[in-house]
Each structure stands twice: as C-alpha cells, then as structure tokens.
Amino acid sequence: MSRQVPGVRGVRALLPAEAHAWTAVESCARGLFAAYGYQEVRLPLLEHTELYARAVGEVTDIVEKEMYTFVDRNGDSLSLRPEGTAGCVRAGIEAGVFHNQTQRFWYQGPMFRHERPQKGRYRQFHQLGVEAYGMAGPDIEAEMILLGERLWRRLGVKAHLLINSLGTAACRSAYREALVAYLEAHAADLDEDARRRLARNPLRVLDSKNPALEGLLGAAPKLADYWSDEAAAHFGGLTDRLDDAGVRYTVTPRLVRGLDYYTHTVFEWVSDALGAQATVCAGGRYDGLVEELGGAATPAVGFALGLERLVTLVTQWPREAPLDVFVITEPPARRRALALAERLRERDYKVEVYLGSAGLKSQIKRAQGSGARLAVYAHAEDIELPGAGGSQERAGWNEAAAAIAARLENRGMNG
Ligand code: HAM
C-alpha cells in the first residue's frame, strides 16, 4: 500500500453522519434568519491582508499570529479569511449598499486561524454570521440577541448571555489611559502574557485567564466609569429591551473581545458544556468600521456563531424529511430499479437505490437502517424493462410508481 497523506492539523472533514447534523442546524438557522429579514451574502475566502490589519487590528492575536497569509503570483499579500465581518463590510462598500440604507445580511462558511488546536478550537472552523447596517439604536442589538436566543431554544441549546459596553471611541481611549496607568503601577505583579498585552493592546489584559491575576484585574478601573452619557443611555436602552423580552444576561465589565472594531455593545453567549472554549457565539456593535474601510459612516452590528461548538450543544435535532423509499435490487434488476426510482423522484419522493455488492439479507438490514418509510424489492422477473419508448411499457412503470405512491400516502411505516 502507498503511504497515506495526512490531513492538515486542525482541519477536519465531515463525513455523512456529522454533515447531516450540520445541515440540520444550518437549515434551522437559515429559516430563522429569513424570519428576521436577513438576506444571504456569499463572501470570498480570500482578501487582501491589509483588510484584516485595518479592520480586526494590527495588534490583535488574529492579525499578529493567526492568519494564513501568503504572497500570490502578482506579489500581493493575501490572507484566508479569519472572520467574516471585515469582508462583509468591504464587499458592501464596493457594491454601494450601505449609503442611506438599512441592510440585514447573513453568511456562512469556513474561517481560518492558525491557533493551537484543541477541543472546540480548529484551524479551519465554520461560522454562521449576521451583520446589520444603518441602524444606530439599541433595538437592533436587542433584536439580534433575541434571534440568537430563539435559535438556541429551537435547538435545545443552553447558553448564557454576557454583555458589556465599550462606549464610544472617546470613552474607550480615556479608559485605556486609566487602565494603562493602573497596570503600569502593578507591572511587577503581571505575568509575561499580560505585560506583552499591556505594551501592545492594553484592553486585552482584561481577558487574561490567569487566576493569579484575578484580584488585580478585579480592582482595575471599570469601563463603565468612563462611559459618556450617550454610551450609558445606549447600553441602558439595550438592557431595557432585554428585560422587556425576559432575556437573562450578566453584565460583564471585563468583556472586551479580541477584535479591535467594536464600539458600544459587545456580547458573548457561553456554555459550561463546552470546556475551555466556552463561547458559542459572539459579536457586538462596530459603528466605526465602514468609515475606517473607506465607506461613509454607517452604524453596524453583528455576531458570528461557531458551528463546531454549536453542533456539540444541540440536544433537539430539527427533523429532516426522511427517505421515502429504499429500493433493494440485485444487478440483473438494476436497470429497471433505476428507471422506477426516477419515476418516483418525478413525484418528489426521496429514493435511494442500493447499487453496492451486498446480498439481499444485508440489503434488507440496510433498508431498515436507512429510516425509509417503504422498502421496495425490484427483481428481474417482476417488472418488464421499458422497450424503445413503447407506451405500453411506460404506463407499466408509471403504474408501479403509482402503486408505491399510493402505499406511501396510506401508510407511514416500513413495508
Ligand atoms: P470571534 O469571537 O472571533 O468573532 O468568533 C466568533 C465565534 O467563532 C466564536 O465565539 C467561536 O464560537 C467561533 N470560533 C472562533 N475561533 C474559532 C476556532 N479557532 N475554532 C472553532 N471555533 C471558533 C468574530 O469572528 C466576529 N467576526 C463576530 C462578529 C460578527 N462581530 C460582529 N459581527
């Protein structure tokens, strides 16, 4: 045997059982997105590296060390997308769909980050994301959070909502100054990671998972003390709406997110059942990004959920239409079995014809395992092959298909 070529670390294939589960979750989400007025966009996997440097931020883990970046044959630096928001904004600006308009978009697909793979963390992972443009008030954040909650409910997922506000860009920079002064005064007590973050992106120190820093970070200046009246009113507007809807949440002063484009609201849905990678869905408002990327100032909000993580939390699988007919056949009858199956599909039934090398007994087992409502045995003697277009024979096929259809309409169970 030849040597096998291994798959890439952190990059997984989905075989039918898993792919089926994913499709069920995706179609549930797709239905909800439509119910909230979101339209699908299909975004490229490749963008200029500069897009992510400017949108996500030069001094973020994603841009500093996680992107799959290469120089193409024209000498351009390109990156595989590490997330969907930057590309969505770039595409929207180019298409001119933001100016004086409101938009609700959704997308899905693979994202790429060169992180250390572990449970729930992959190098190719998949997001479902929503982005809304042109809506400045907290209503859209509330609506988006309700959409998320409804999705969890439909899928039987338990997740808890964490929210915070980063305020406006001005609040954030005043806060940053105070935080830097505090952290510098305690520099000796910081770990190496926190010292590195302090020098490059101080807000990210708040994200430290080191329990030894808990006390020090708990006593750090609070973002809320630096909110402007406008920022406080916006956040109060959101919590009012969540309270109206009965959504439970925890205001989490140290929730800052790892991407630089956020202003005002940030949120994460977390679950204890996920282990160390506890966030199943995350997002927030990013009012400055469209302008930063060359468009007109446009308020914007979005979130993305990680499909790998969501699928592990699902307890209530959305029902997929089952197979209607499983056709058991042996090679001499296959030509006619194919013809019969086509006639059934013509009537919109889902049909699988067995075309492998297993014998009858094992095919019957497979038919039972397939979940099909009806198993049909097409054997050589029973059904005449249709001749060269003879109408008599055609009618015969249609009769066979009609008889099967009648049985499907009258009974739900295997027969
Ligand atoms: P993010 O927090 O970087 O935000 O990613 C969103 C979600 O993607 C995470 O909560 C997680 O479920 C999943 N995820 C991230 N990295 C990985 C990984 N390596 N393996 C598996 N799952 C992962 C964003 O990407 C923003 N674009 C969200 C957003 C949209 N903000 C506004 N609009």
Image (cartoon, helix red, strand yellow):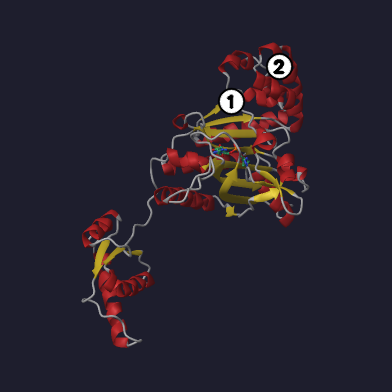
> For the point 25% across and 66% down, which residue is it?
376
Q: Does any atom of ligand 1 lie closer than 8 Å to the CB of label 1?
A: no
Considering only order in the chain, which callout, 2 or 1, is on the residue closer to the N terminus? 2
Residue marked by disc 1 = 252
Quadrant hosting residue 412: bottom left
SS at mark 2? helix
Decide if residue 378 is on the left or right side of residue 127: left
Decide if residue 196 is on the left or right side of residue 272: right
Q: Quadrant of ligand 1?
A: top right
**Which dot, 1 or 2, sits closer to the camera?**
2
SS at mark 1? loop
Residue 255 shows in this picture? yes
Task: Identify the amino acid type marked 2.
Answer: Leu
Label drawn at residue 183: 2
Badge 1 local density, few (<14 within 10 Å), some, or many (20+)? some
Task: Identify the amino acid type marked 1.
Answer: Thr
> For the point 77% across and 30% down, which residue is it?
170
Badge 2 local density, few (<14 within 10 Å), some, or many (20+)? many
Residue 298 shows in this picture? no
* Residue most extreme to the front: 1
Residue 376 or residue 414, whichever sits in front: 376
> For the point 38% across and 40% down, which residue is it?
315
- Tell me residue 65's x, y (percent): 67, 35
Residue 110 or residue 66, whichever sits in front: 66
Label drawn at residue 227: none
- Tell me residue 269's x, y (percent): 53, 34
- Is 396 placed above or below 346 here? below
- Tell me residue 138's x, y (percent): 63, 38
Contact between labelled residues 2 and 1, with CB atoms less than 8 Å apart: no
Q: Does any atom of ligand 1 lie closer than 8 Å to the CB of label 2?
A: no
Residue 181 or residue 171, whichever sits in front: 181
